[in-house]
Amino acid sequence: MIYVPGDLFSVNPLTAENVPNLFARNERVVCIFDTAFGPMAHILVGATIVGSIETVWSGTVTPPTGQSIRRWDYPAEGDQAIFLKKGEEMGRFKLGSTVINLFPKGAITFDEAIIPGKPTRMGEAYARQNSAEIAAE
């Protein structure tokens, strides 16, 4: 898990369209997970008046905010390893913001019913895992 300090611009569509590199400029917490289809980055992006970013394993990550990148390493196995089941909560904002998920190239195919800008809801599929052969291409 990596805390990256930054700005706290709003993440609404109008601001996102008009602030260059908004999601790379805002404060964020980057969580890297090992999954069945390879590494996945789950990026919790801070925003204007977002009171706090938390993870279920470490509690409150921000505030306090800071000027330095902070990093936490967790083992992949053993008592200190973090395992999450499908659909299990991994973190939260104390007020809404946005989350970005990054997957290895070719690992997933987005559902054709997904409409850019439409919120996703818990339990709603937005992609499917590709077979290992497709992901290796």
Image (cartoon, rainbow, N blue to C red):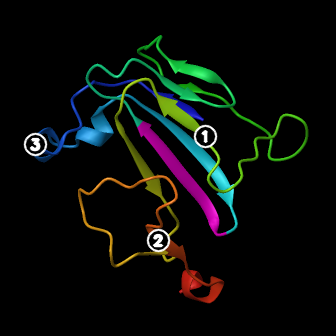
Which of the two discs, 1 and 3, labels the residue nearer the N terminus? 3
Magenta stretch, main secondary structure, is: strand
Label 2 – label 3 distance at C-alpha: 26 Å
Please give left or right for residue 127 compared with residue 27 in the image: right
Q: Is residue 84 above or below residue 56?
A: below
Q: CA distance from mark 1 to mark 3?
A: 28 Å
Magenta span contains residue 9:
no
The residue labelled by disc 3 is 14
* Whole-percent x, y for residue 90 in the image: 61, 40
Q: Amino acid at mark 2?
A: Ala
Residue at 33% across, 25% down: 6
Q: Is residue 20 above or below residue 57?
A: below
Rendered-image quadrant of the N terminus: top right
Residues packed near mark 3 inside 10 Å, few (<14), some (14 to 19) or many (20 plus): few
Pointer 2 local density, CA inside 10 Å: few below 14, some 14–19, many at least 20: some
Secondary structure, mark 1, is loop
What's under tag 1, amino acid-wise? Met
Q: Which of the labelled discs sits on residue 90, or is there none?
A: 1
The segment highlighted magenta reads: 37-44
Looking at the image, do the residues carrying marks 2 and 3 touch, with CB atoms under 8 Å apart?
no
79 to the left or right of 120: right
Q: CA distance from mark 1 to mark 2?
A: 19 Å
From the viewer's side, name the closer residue of 137 and 79.
Answer: 79
Which mark is on residue 127?
Answer: 2
Amino acid marked by disc 3: Leu
Q: Is residue 53 left or right of residue 78?
A: left
Look at the numbered disc 2 and give the secondary structure of its residue: strand
Labels 1 and 3 touching (C-beta < 8 A): no
The mark tally for this picture is 3
